[in-house]
Image (cartoon, helix red, strand yellow):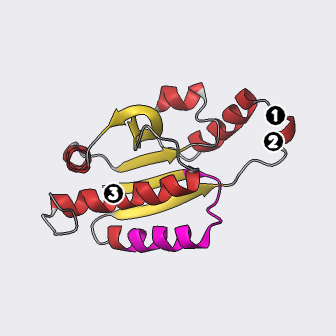
Amino acid sequence: MKIKLLAVGKTDDIALQQSIETFESRLRRYVSFTIDIIPDLKHTKNLSESEQKHKEGQLILNKITPTDRLFLLDEKGQSYSSVEFSTFLQKQMNSSVKQLVLVIGGPYGFSDSVYDKANGKISLSKMTFSHQMIRLFAVEQLYRGFSILRNEPYHHR
């Protein structure tokens, strides 16, 4: 299985980017992993929230293939403990998923077309975090999940 983290907008905080790269490197020991960045939309001042979500949604859907298993990182999604998330990852691998795609949307969330295409939603917290921080949390939790599956000492039970 391959995993792709698809995110709208770049990470401009150097410390966060370095931390993301650290966990990316660790995660690649377990699974083929990529981060695909969709550039922020230009000239959004004249766009409504709905128009912005629609345009971002089109860009997101252009990055998805028919065989991808798509999960949105969304505050209204399913909450998991780290151990439960590792079980979720194992189930995806057991079901012969070619590519698992986790998506971090733009500032207003996702368009209806993206919700319709998604296989599910995952919540990392009920709290709201910047999209840049969510990237780090997602990559760290993926790494933690695989370390749990391998019974490695990173996660303390």
107 and 36: which is toward the camera: 107
Q: Main secondary structure of the magenta part?
A: helix
The answer to whether one can see residue 46 in this image is yes
Check disc 3 and report its element: helix, strand or loop. Answer: helix
Callout 1 crowding tier (Cα within 10 Å): few <14, some 14–19, many ≥20: few
Q: Image quadrant of residue 52?
A: top right
Q: Which mark is residue 47?
A: 1
Q: Is residue 7 left or right of residue 52?
A: left
Seen at 64% across and 60% down, the residue is 10
Seen at 53% across and 48% down, the residue is 129
70 to 54, vertically: above or below = below
Magenta stretch: residue 9 in it?
yes
Q: Image quadrant of residue 43?
A: top right
The answer to whether one can see residue 119 in this image is no
Per the image, the residue denoted by label 2 is 44
Q: CA distance from mark 1 to mark 2?
A: 5 Å
Q: Write the start and end of the magenta stretch as one range.
A: 7-25
Q: Which mark is residue 142?
A: 3
Magenta stretch: residue 122 in it?
no
